[in-house]
Amino acid sequence: MSLQNARQRNIETKRLIADGISLKDDKKKTQADKKNQITYHAMLA
């Protein structure tokens, strides 16, 4: 991970905390979204 990527991730993390969103919940949602995308793409194949 580059320094620029790390800084961007820190900014996003601080924004999520300020918005009151749990990082674990957000990570679970992201993982679920990725899983759904993979499933959707597999269905199209």
Image (spheres, rainbow, N blue to C red):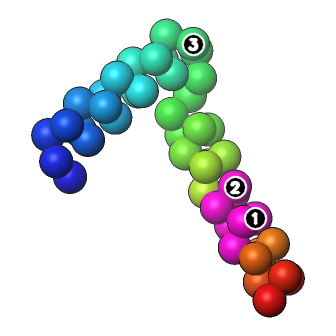
Count of numbered tags = 3
Relative to 6, 36 lies left or right: right
Q: Which residues are magenta?
A: 32-38
Q: Are marks 1 and 3 in contact (CB under 8 Å)?
A: no
**Residue that carries the numbered disc 3 in the rendered image:** 19
**Residue that carries the numbered disc 2 in the rendered image:** 33
**Quarter occupied by residue 25:** top right
Q: Are marks 2 and 1 in contact (CB under 8 Å)?
A: yes
In three-dimensional space, the C-alpha distance between marks 1 and 3, rounded to whole angstroms, equals 25 Å
Q: Residue at x 61, y 57 (%)?
A: 31
Q: Residue at x 72, y 66 (%)?
A: 37
In three-dimensional space, the C-alpha distance between marks 3 and 2, rounded to whole angstroms, equals 20 Å
Which badge, 3 or 2, comes first in the chain's sequence? 3
**Residue that carries the numbered disc 1 in the rendered image:** 36
| Residue type of the residue flagged with mark 3 | Asp
| Residue type of the residue flagged with mark 1 | Asn
